[in-house]
Structure formats: structure tokens, C-alpha cells
């Protein structure tokens, strides 16, 4: 394990991905409204998901602005949680977008449609993908021919909530962590961003049962060759090949 939070072209900042040269911040699955769903089921959470999300991202943006210029924010889909329309979720999302507009112009906030995003906004367009130079951003559930144009070198996705279970040598202490996955597929560099959603850590691909739906761009066996970057409390750490960590 070694500390690893940046490369020549991109850097990991907590659960987000930042491209310093382009000034682009990419944020994975927010799932706003999950706390409301839990409360509707009779479980009282002492947790305001919207406000906590804004606080976390405020800290990340301050870190970026201390060194770089932030030009654009891209939300990588699954901005809300329910599959159907839910009024409170859309209200929370609008609140969150107003928060982002304090940091970058409205036209520089890019929304990617995820499989949970069954809504429309009159003042925002929901995109299947977004291309900036040689980088393409998409949710990761559906494939698009444009992603594989020869000009595209890097494809950024989210969707699968990548995580890894870290155990001690005798397999007694076990703890799950969010992680980034970085690797090559179809001659492109893929970066899979963890969910920003803070209530759960995510899922190892080995946790999916045989035959269970796992609709995403990269086959499981290919993901095992990707490099794993684990999100720790204070930094992001390189843990090697994903396949060696998940068995």
C-alpha cells in the first residue's frame, strides 16, 4: 500500500476526481433522497443527507481552489435515489444545484443521466455523456458509440459503486472502503469513480450473485485487472490489482 492521490493528468480528492489542467471536478452517484426513503420506512436517521453532502463537497472545492482553478463540475448520474419521480428528491437536487452555482457558472454544471434519474428539469439538460477534449464522461450503465471515437483517451464512469473489503491476515477484522478503479479496456483508459453517497460504502463485484444483473460497460473479469485506489480518511491509497483484493 502506498499513498497515491494524483497523476500527471488527474487527481483523487476524497471521493471525487479532478482534472487540474481542465479544471473539471467529477462527482459520482449522490443518491439524494435516500435518507427520506429510510425515514418513510419508519427508521429515524439523525442525518441530513443533503446538508452533509454539501458540507463534504464544500471542503473538496476549497481544497481545489487553494491550488487550482475550478472551471466545471460534472455529476456522473444517479443524482437522486428513487427510480420513480419523488418530489422531495427533486427539491433536494435543485437545492444542491443552487449550492454548486455559487462555485461555478450554471452553464458549467454538467448533469449526466443515471438509471435512477427519472426526471426532467426545465433549466438543466440531462446528458447521456459529455466530452471535453480527449475525456468522455458517462454514467456507465449504457454504452454509446461516441465514447470510442479515436480522439477519446479516457472514459470516466460511476454507476457500480466500487468498493473493496480489507481484512487482516487472520480474517477477523474486516472493513469495507470506497475505491476508484483505473485500467484499460477497448484501448481506452477507464476511471470508475466511487459513489459520493455516504450512507453505504459500495459493492465488490464478487458480491454479485451468479446471474444477477450487473449492467455496466466493463466485464467483471476485465475489472479484476484494474488498479485499486482506496479512499481513506485523509488520502487515497494505491492497493494494487482489484482482482487480488477481492479474490
Image (cartoon, rainbow, N blue to C red):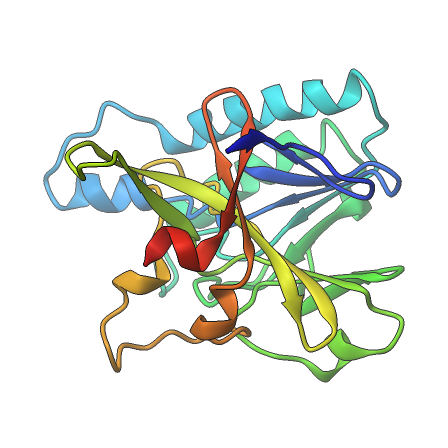
Residue 136: x and y, percent? 75, 63
- Give me the residue at 21% from left, 29% from top: 45
Residue 234: x and y, percent? 52, 20
Instruction: Judge whether residue 14 can be spotted in this image.
Output: no
Q: In the picture provided, is 116 more to the left or to the right than 124?
A: left
Instruction: Judge whether residue 3 can be spotted in this image.
Output: yes
Question: Which of 26/105 is in front?
Answer: 26
Residue 123: x and y, percent? 69, 53
**Image quadrant occupied by the C terminus:** bottom left
- Give me the residue at 19% from left, 31% from top: 173
Q: In the picture provided, is 224 more to the left or to the right than 144?
A: left
- Give me the residue at 13% from left, 46% from top: 41
Q: Is the residue 70 above or below the residue 133 in the image?
A: above
Q: Residue furthest front?
A: 169
Q: Is the residue 210 above or below the residue 192 in the image?
A: below
Residue 1: x and y, percent? 50, 33
* Quarter of image, res 82: bottom left
Q: In the picture provided, is 179 more to the left or to the right than 110?
A: left
- Give me the residue at 55% from left, 25% from top: 235
Amino acid at each position: 500500500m502506498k499513498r497515491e492521490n494524483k497523476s500527471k493528468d488527474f487527481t483523487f480528492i476524497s471521493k471525487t476526481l479532478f482534472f487540474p489542467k481542465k479544471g473539471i471536478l467529477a462527482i459520482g452517484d449522490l443518491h439524494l433522497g435516500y435518507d427520506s426513503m429510510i425515514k418513510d420506512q419508519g427508521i429515524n436517521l439523525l442525518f441530513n443527507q443533503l446538508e452533509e453532502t454539501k458540507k463534504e463537497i464544500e471542503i473538496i472545492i476549497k481544497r481545489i481552489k487553494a491550488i487550482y482553478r475550478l472551471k466545471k463540475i460534472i455529476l456522473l448520474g444517479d443524482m437522486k435515489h428513487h427510480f420513480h419521480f419523488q418530489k422531495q428528491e427533486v427539491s433536494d437536487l435543485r437545492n444542491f444545484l443552487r449550492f454548486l452555482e455559487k462555485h461555478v457558472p450554471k452553464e458549467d454544471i454538467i448533469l449526466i443521466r443515471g438509471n435512477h434519474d427519472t426526471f426532467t428539469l426545465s433549466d438543466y439538460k440531462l446528458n447521456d455523456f459529455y466530452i471535453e477534449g480527449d475525456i468522455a464522461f458517462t454514467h456507465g450503465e449504457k454504452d454509446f458509440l461516441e465514447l470510442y471515437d479515436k480522439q477519446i483517451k479516457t472514459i470516466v464512469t460511476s454507476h457500480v459503486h466500487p468498493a473493496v473489503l480489507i481484512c487482516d491476515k487472520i480474517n477477523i477484522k474486516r472493513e469495507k472502503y470506497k475505491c476508484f478503479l483505473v485500467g484499460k479496456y477497448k484501448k481506452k483508459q477507464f476511471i470508475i469513480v466511487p459513489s459520493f453517497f455516504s450512507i453505504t460504502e459500495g459493492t465488490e463485484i464478487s458480491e454479485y450473485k451468479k446471474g444477477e444483473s450487473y449492467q455496466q460497460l466493463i466485464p467483471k473479469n476485465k475489472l479484476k485487472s484494474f488498479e485499486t485506489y482506496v479512499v481513506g480518511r485523509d488520502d487515497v491509497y494505491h492497493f494494487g490489482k482489484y482482482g487480488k483484493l477481492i479474490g
